[in-house]
């Protein structure tokens, strides 16, 4: 899901930087609002740190084959969202991407703003959808495959859409870019089908380890209605 070096370069990199800064700014505002509403900054820090470590692990240790215009990553954004919540997931993606770029792949640093945008905005869209399709009296441990699939489709579909946008923005609409973008999108269909199964498995484990409910690590909505 990350933009390869050279796909967007020169003055065009400014747009990616701008959207990346704006995306991080939105998350920062949400984090401040979260602390004001819940008053437990330590829980937010703990969940965000857990999300950051997992995101970095997903990037580095899970398979990420190159397909078309980018690499296909199994980021498990819906799993993180359902267990840890919107803000920790978004913060985890930010720090995971930054750590991955600076520690393991410095060639990705110029594309960091684009990559942040590509992941953060789909998470926010997924969170908005969750408010619509998951009833307020339903804890996330009771989410169905169909609901998880819809969340995954929005998250992964958002990633594909942003990757395609950056490629067409940087390289133009050509037969080659269209074919590569199509190949990338087609493989992500597999991720959309697979991710909800992983989500339900993680939620089943959460039911088993319900003793962690009051530790502050899982998101309150995991076990409780809104």
Image (spheres, helix red, strand yellow):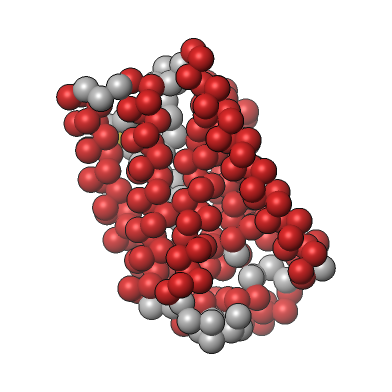
Residue 48 spot, x, y in % from top left: 68, 55
Left or right side of 208 for 34: right
Q: Nearer the viewer, residue 76 or 11?
A: 11
In the rendered image, the vertical position of residue 52 relative to residue 212, given as above or below: above
Is residue 126 depicted above or below 29 in this figure? Answer: below
Find the residue positioned furthest to the bottom. Answer: 137
Q: Is residue 124 left or right of residue 70?
A: right
Q: Quadrant of residue 4?
A: top left
x and y percent of residue 9 in the render? 46, 16
Residue at x-position 40% and y-position 48% = 158
Q: Residue furthest top?
A: 10
Up-down relation of residue 92 to residue 173 (above or below): below
Task: Give the position of the C terminus as an image quadrant.
Answer: bottom right
Q: Residue at x 65, y 75 (%)?
A: 220
Q: How many marks?
A: 0
Q: Is residue 52 visible?
A: no
x and y, in percent, of residue 163 in the image? 38, 36
Q: Quadrant of residue 102?
A: top right
Query: Quarter of the image containing the N terminus?
Result: top left
72 with respect to 128 (left or right) = left
Q: Nearer the viewer, residue 183 or 121?
A: 121
Q: Residue at x 33, y 73 (%)?
A: 146
Asked if residue 12 can be seen in this view, the reply is yes
Residue 35 vertical position relative to residue 114 in the rendered view, above or below: below
For image coordinates 53% across by 68% down, the residue present is 82
**Percent x, y of residue 71:** 36, 36
């Amino acid at each position: 899901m990350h933009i390869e070096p050279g796909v967007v370069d020169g003055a065009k990199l400014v747009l990616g930087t701008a959207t990346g800064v704006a995306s991080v700014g939105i998350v920062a505002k949400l984090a401040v609002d979260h602390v004001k509403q819940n008053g437990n900054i330590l829980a937010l820090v703990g969940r965000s740190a857990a999300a950051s470590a997992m995101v970095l692990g997903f990037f580095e240790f899970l398979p990420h084959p190159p397909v078309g215009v980018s690499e296909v990553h199994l980021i498990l954004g819906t799993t993180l969202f359902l267990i840890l919540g919107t803000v920790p997931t978004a913060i985890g993606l930010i720090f995971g991407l930054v750590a991955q770029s600076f520690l393991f792949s410095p060639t990705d640093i110029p594309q960091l703003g684009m990559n942040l945008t590509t992941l953060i905005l789909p998470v926010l869209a997924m969170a908005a959808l969750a408010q619509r399709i998951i009833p307020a009296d339903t804890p996330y441990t009771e989410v169905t495959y169909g609901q998880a699939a819809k969340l995954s489709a929005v998250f992964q579909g958002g990633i594909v859409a942003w990757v395609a946008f950056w490629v067409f923005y940087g390289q133009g609409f050509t037969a080659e870019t269209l074919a590569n973008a199509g190949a990338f999108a087609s493989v992500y269909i597999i991720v959309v089908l697979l991710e909800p199964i992983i989500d339900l498995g993680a939620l089943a484990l959460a039911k088993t380890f319900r003793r962690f409910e009051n530790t502050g690590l899982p998101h309150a909505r995991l076990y409780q209605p809104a």
